[in-house]
Image: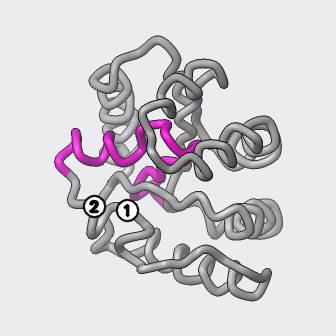
Amino acid sequence: MAVRRLGLIGHSGAGKTVCLDTLGIDRETGDMDAALDLRLSQSDAEALRALDRAMMWLESRDTPKVVTLRNDEKMLYAMLGAKVSRPRSFRRFALVYLHYQKQELEQHLKARTDTEAVQYTLATYDRFDGELFSKLADRTIECSGKTIEAIVGEISDMASHLIEANV
């Protein structure tokens, strides 16, 4: 089976949504939160339901070729468990980690007004980086020191190599 799409993952403030906008992808269809109207999972059962919906969305022919995944910790852990136990379910898409060094991410987040979300992102950086994003990712783009245009260029190149070559 061929890779059909790229799913961008990364910390809040890493530029996932800005990448969608720069690529000209409508947030209503390309951003998991908007497309699925998901809420933060409060329980493992909710996370599994969210994961089921997410997997169907990632497999859908109507979903754009590049999308962003939500930063729902419980759902991401459920996704990691599913990727390990059911790797065949993940063959149709590749997860791309937009990685920033913590210090640079902190600089990006200074402009944010939601101080609670910023504090959470920085407090959980090491755990998300080591336990989730780096293990979920099929590819990583090192974003530190790069412009958004350079990052989007790498995403576009990756999409053309992984997706178009396999269509």
Classify residue 105 as left or right of residue 126: left
Q: Could you tell me residue 34's position as x and y percent?
A: 36, 71
Front in this rendered view, residue 81 or 111: 111
Pointer 2: what residue?
27
- Tell me the crowding category of disc 2: few under 14, some 14 to 19, or many 20 or more residues within 10 angstroms, Cα based: some
Classify residue 158 as left or right of residue 117: left
Amino acid of disc 2:
Arg
Q: Could you tell me residue 36's position as x and y percent?
A: 42, 79
The residue located at (27%, 61%) in the rendering is 27
The magenta stretch spans residue 7: yes
Is residue 69 depicted above or below 147 in this figure? below
Classify residue 153 as left or right of residue 59: left
Instruction: Kindly identify which numbered label has been placed on residue 31.
Output: 1
Image quadrant assignment for residue 162: top left
Q: How is the image coloured?
A: one colour
Image quadrant assignment for residue 46: bottom right
The residue located at (52%, 22%) in the rendering is 107
Front in this rendered view, residue 109 or 82: 109
Instruction: Kindly identify which numbered label has been placed on residue 144.
Output: none
Q: CA distance from mark 1 to mark 2?
A: 5 Å
Amino acid of disc 1:
Asp
The residue located at (50%, 61%) in the rendering is 92
Question: Which part of the image, by quadrant, shows the C terminus?
Answer: bottom left
Front in this rendered view, residue 72 or 106: 106
How many circles with numbers are drawn on the protein? Answer: 2
Q: Which residues are magenta?
A: 1-24
Is residue 149 depicted above or below 24 in this figure? above
